[in-house]
Image (cartoon, rainbow, N blue to C red):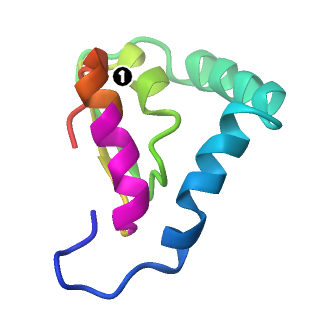
């Protein structure tokens, strides 16, 4: 996650656009990617770490496959999204 007072990550200016894109025009791709994650990962009892998670778009998929999902992104703007997903009850740790 971004450090208070640190310079913005280059990705910050694209975070909102990316989230909209992933939920809209890229839906077919994200559905196929989510299905592939489920097939490859199977069910796990331990935690999973999503490094450089961006907006944490796949964190809910990962959380359903593991006991816990931790997300990490150098982008403060992108890190806002996993927190919002956690507040929505998706039980994602960050």
Q: Is residue 16 magenta?
A: no
Magenta stretch: give its range. 75-84
Q: Going by the image, does 25 lie left or right of 21?
A: right
- Vertical placement of 38 versus 71: above or below? above
Disc count in the image?
1
Q: Circle 1 sits on which residue? A: 63
| On-image quarter of the N terminus | bottom left
The residue at the far left in this view is: 4
Say which residue appears at 68% left-offset and 39% top-offset.
Answer: 22
Towards the viewer: 39 or 77: 77
Label the magenta part by its dominant secondary structure: helix
Q: Which of the 4 quarters of the picture holds residue 2?
A: bottom left
Could you tell me residue 21's position as x and y percent? 72, 44
Q: Hey, which quadrant is residue 36 in on the image?
A: top right
Give the residue at x 41% y 11%. 43
In what element is the residue under mark 1? helix
């Amino acid at each position: 996650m971004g450090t208070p007072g640190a310079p913005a990550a280059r990705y910050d200016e694209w975070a909102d656009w990316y989230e909209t894109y992933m939920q809209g025009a890229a839906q077919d791709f994200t559905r196929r990617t989510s299905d592939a994650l489920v097939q490859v990962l199977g069910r796990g009892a331990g935690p999973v770490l999503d490094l450089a998670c961006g907006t944490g778009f796949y964190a809910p998929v990962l959380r359903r496959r593991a006991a816990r999902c931790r997300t990490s992104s150098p982008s403060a703007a992108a890190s806002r999204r996993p927190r919002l997903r956690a507040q929505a009850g998706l039980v994602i740790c960050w």
